[in-house]
Image (cartoon, rainbow, N blue to C red):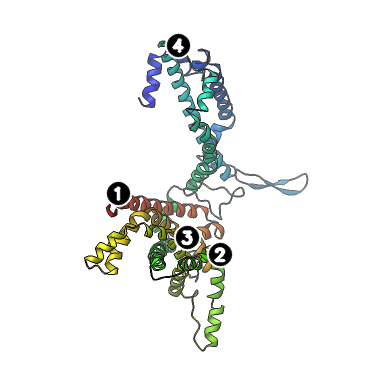
Amino acid sequence: MNILERLKYGLKNGDNITRLSYLVMGAGSFLRKQYHRGIAFVSIQIIAIVYFISSGFSRIKGLRTLGTVAAGRVFDEDRGIYINTKGDNSMLFLLFGVLAVILLVVFLYLYYLNIENSIHNQELQEEGKPLKTLKEDVSDLLDGKFHITVLSIPSLLTVAFTVLPLIFMILIAFTNFDKAHQPPGTMFTWVGFENFRVMFYESKIISGTFFALLKWTFIWAFFATFLNYILGMLLAMLINAKPIKMKKMWRTIFVITIAIPQFVSLLLMSKLLADQGTINQILIKLGHTAIPFLSNPTIAKITLITVNLWVGIPYTMLITSGILMNIPQDMYESAKIDGATPLVQFTKITLPYMLSVTAPYLITQFVGNFNNFNVIYLLTGGGPLTLKYHKAGHTDLLVTWLYKLTVDEKNYALASTLGIVIFAISATLSLIVFRKVTQGNKEGEFQ
């Protein structure tokens, strides 16, 4: 039975005690001498009634307007001065309204559990079976339902610090919360899908910025993921090759780049590659023209991809080294007998096997590079700047543009809209690609 059918069943077939639990939570437990459950349920009902009557329903109602009283100034005739009056804080209206809705959903679920418990108790009594005592319930929570005991607090914290803020930030995308509407001084209101229309087609400069940065973001994510992957794999194959000696030493040399914090390497590279940086100063002294590593849009993008190889290849090398050692050598020997060249062996044996094993890693790396904030922000800051884009530079990714919209522009509504779009793209790509690459046991084909 679904929930509605279960509720109808309780009203139709339940006794008076079960029906009373529809009005008084815990009645189906308390009147059947299951006092601990009865007290717990009725306490929840009392707390919920007090909360929703005192503030809960008004906060849910406040979600419709997000505040009605604007801040202002009133002249105090006694003191002869103007006094600032407080207005409604739209942010708090939205936050507490969302919290009230979540609490209402939780209460309705507990209300259903109360009815379900009452129906179950009636069925046990009709069958002549005893109801669980407090000691048995506690014992059950420490044994059969121990997972509930362990996960209850983390689940509550997840709702409080992850789900609630997430819902709050999603709803911001449907408001006009920007630098012109900053609570508590100025209220913001609902605008529906206006921000999405602005993002996609209404504003030429904003939509132009979005699609240009979306294109560059895909290009960056593709090269930053697959160049690191292929080159890291080739490096691992080279180090693992039989003629190569002192393999541990070579691995250690490349691992050193991982030991150094990434932000240190990126900040150092940004200084070295600046127009007046060390590398250009050396080139000038040698009689060459300075190279605009970070000030020319095209060269800056190539520089970003190249520098990312320095910090990304060692990770792939470490991951693929162990997998390469597990590929059955008899496959290579059979391929050699059939006359396969090293390139054919790589494309027909090594690469398919690696892809079958590391597909989840590739997906997470692609999504990570799609939202790679550190490399872009620390190396170029999104520059070089251009008047063609709205608060963005040529090398900005969508995620760094989101940061600038939030911190510099204080356009939280547009930033939240962009965040939803980024999430939708990342989630869709991840699900589609992961489903395709994990269909069947592809690794088993190479065993």
- Could you give the CA–CA distance between mark 2 and mark 1, rounded to whole angstroms? 38 Å
Q: Is residue 393 visible?
A: no
Q: How busy is the neighbourhood of tag 1: few (under 14 within 10 Å), some, or many (20 plus)?
A: few
The residue to which callout 4 is attached is 16
Among numbered discs 3 and 4, the one appearing first in the sequence: 4
Q: Position of residue 2 (x, y in %)?
A: 36, 27
- Could you give the CA–CA distance between mark 3 and mark 1, rounded to whole angstroms? 31 Å
Q: Secondary structure at mark 3?
A: loop
Among numbered discs 1 and 4, the one appearing first in the sequence: 4
Q: Position of residue 248 (x, y in %)?
A: 48, 65
Q: Secondary structure at mark 4?
A: helix
Of the numbered discs in the image, which one, if any, rests on residue 260? 2
Identity, as a three-letter code, of the amino acid under mark 4: Asn
- Could you give the CA–CA distance between mark 3 and mark 4, rounded to whole angstroms? 62 Å
Identity, as a three-letter code, of the amino acid under mark 2: Ile
- The residue most toward the bottom is 287
Q: Secondary structure at mark 2?
A: loop
